[in-house]
């Protein structure tokens, strides 16, 4: 059967555009369909603009340190809208960069909304629902991403009740910000807003902040943020919301489990960052026999759905981490699989991304990064392990540059030296984690990491010393 394309990606986010480029590199006739801006949520209203805000927040808060040297600043003319504007400039520049890369790699970019006719055919419509064209493809990859989850009673108006999108578009600072959810998004915006002088209070339903991270990390970063004036209410859930006259928000919270006293918090704006919902409603997947779980797509090996030749990657995949780098890796794997089936490449080495080798990163300060097992997981499973920690305050460069907060924590098999997992809390953590991840992925032992010479003075010495700690041989602590 003749098809218009070898492979079509629906969505041009970190999954779609990366997968499309890889497919074209492998010699496949490739197209990507996008109804909004190239780069998706991550590049336009997520990862990139939020990191631009974090960088500016870091520079702003650094002024306090300069007071030690007699330097003073007049911030009365500070204009947050210019900070926000710089973040939009960065996003727009990179979106244009994606457009260039797709063109360079001879990927056809089609504007519009796609819906499936069958597993090999789709229709593209414009903003008014008018059908523009129909296309067929040997393989179709669903890479439609996700959107902020809406909690009934807390619907976004993007003025006082903000989603992660709304707070990125906010051009002025509130005096008081309430945040629902102490995951990565909640903690990053808690850092940004606190750095710019906003009073921040964070509510988390689970018993600790950053619940996906190691318990020691959660405890340590909570102490750092509390020292800066951020207040946390863990084990609490939102019960009700009132928008008072004058713009004030009254948020009632109560214990998430069991009985307890309700508390009322007051703020000017509320950020709801309690997860994301998959964009799968308009794809007509049910009629093709694709299994959905609360809107998420169930997949098999190589991320193929129940409909042969139809694949799903990124945030819409059931049971997978909603991370941009995971989406990109999945999309590349699918592109390589389709190329193999069409006789244009080798079969991927693995049929799925190995979850234990996926790095997690939170970009507040101090940064948080991890992969593999967390200590609480090892305890729960009853596995034998050794936990070793090396503090940043014993790293020369961390002290010299004024970033002594944090630690490197490595979990190993005491019998073999295998690295089971690692967590880094501190300056540069989101970069440092990759040395340990690379070692684990290539089955190096902790002793081999310890044996590698690290330049002095660097923060990476903390990784070496962490490995030495696992061998009971730490030099500087």
Image (cartoon, grey):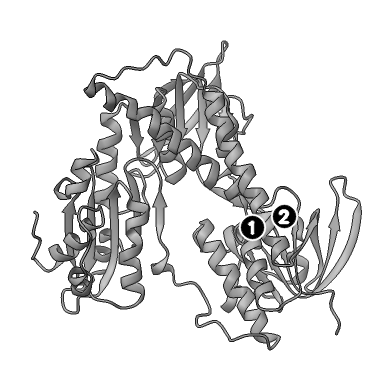
Q: Image quarter for residue 72?
A: top left
Asked whether the residues under the numbered discs 2 and 1 touch, taking CB atoms below 8 Å apart as contact, a structural biologist would say: yes
Residue 151 shows which numbered tag? none
Helix, strand or loop status at disc 1:
loop
Residue 295 — which label? 1
Question: Does 416 sit left or right of 427 as displayed?
Answer: left
Q: Which mark is residue 281?
A: 2
Q: Nearer the viewer, residue 143 or 248?
A: 143
Total numbered labels: 2
Percent x, y of residue 148: 59, 44
Q: Quadrant of the N terminus?
A: bottom right
- 292 vs 199, left or right, is right
Residue that appears at 65% across and 67% down: 21
Q: Give the residue drawn at x 35%, y 70%.
A: 438
Q: Position of residue 82 (x, y in %)?
A: 55, 26
| Residue appearing at x 56%, y 34% in the figure | 86
Which numbered disc, 2 or 1, marks the residue that appears first in the sequence? 2
């Amino acid at each position: 059967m003749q098809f218009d394309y070898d492979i079509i990606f629906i969505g041009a986010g970190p999954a779609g555009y990366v997968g499309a480029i890889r497919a074209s590199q492998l010699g496949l006739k490739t197209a990507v369909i996008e109804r909004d801006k190239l780069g998706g949520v991550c590049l336009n209203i997520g990862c990139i603009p939020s990191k631009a805000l974090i960088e500016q927040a870091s520079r702003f808060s650094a002024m306090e340190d300069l007071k030690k040297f007699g330097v003073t600043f007049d911030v009365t003319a500070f204009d947050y809208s210019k900070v926000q504007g710089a973040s939009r400039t960065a996003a727009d520049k990179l979106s244009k960069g994606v457009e260039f890369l797709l063109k360079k790699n001879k990927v056809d970019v089609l504007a519009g909304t796609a819906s499936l006719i069958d597993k090999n055919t789709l229709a593209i419509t414009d903003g008014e629902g008018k059908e523009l064209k129909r296309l067929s493809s040997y393989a179709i990859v669903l890479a439609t991403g996700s959107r902020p989850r809406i909690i009934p009673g807390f619907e976004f108006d993007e003025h006082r009740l903000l989603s992660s999108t709304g707070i990125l578009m906010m051009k002025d600072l509130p005096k008081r910000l309430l945040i629902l959810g102490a995951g990565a998004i909640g903690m990053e915006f808690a850092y940004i807003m606190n750095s710019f002088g906003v009073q921040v209070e964070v509510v988390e339903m689970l018993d600790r902040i950053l619940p996906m991270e190691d318990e020691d990390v959660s405890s340590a970063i909570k102490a750092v943020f509390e020292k800066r004036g951020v207040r946390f209410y863990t084990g609490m859930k939102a019960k009700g919301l009132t928008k008072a006259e004058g713009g004030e928000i009254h948020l009632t919270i109560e214990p998430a489990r069991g009985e307890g006293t309700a508390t009322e918090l007051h703020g000017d704006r509320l950020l709801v960052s309690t997860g994301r919902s998959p964009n799968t409603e308009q794809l007509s997947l049910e009629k093709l026999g694709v299994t959905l779980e609360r809107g998420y797509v169930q997949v098999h090996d190589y991320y193929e759905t129940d409909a042969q030749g139809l694949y799903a990657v990124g945030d819409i995949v059931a049971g997978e981490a909603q991370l941009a780098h995971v989406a990109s890796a999945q999309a590349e794997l699918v592109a390589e699989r389709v190329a193999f089936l069409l006789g244009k490449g080798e079969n991927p080495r693995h049929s799925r991304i190995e979850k234990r080798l996926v790095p997690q990163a939170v970009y507040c300060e101090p940064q948080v990064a991890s992969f593999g097992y967390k200590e609480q997981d090892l305890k729960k499973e009853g596995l034998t392990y050794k936990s070793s920690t090396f503090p940043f305050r014993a790293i020369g460069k961390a002290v010299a540059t004024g970033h002594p907060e944090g630690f490197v924590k490595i979990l190993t098999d005491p019998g073999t030296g295998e690295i089971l997992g690692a967590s880094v809390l501190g300056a540069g953590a989101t970069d440092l984690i990759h040395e340990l991840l690379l070692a684990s992925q290539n089955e190096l032992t902790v002793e081999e990491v310890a044996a590698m010479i690290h330049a002095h003075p660097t923060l990476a010495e903390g990784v070496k010393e962490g490995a030495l700690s696992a061998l009971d041989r730490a030099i500087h602590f």
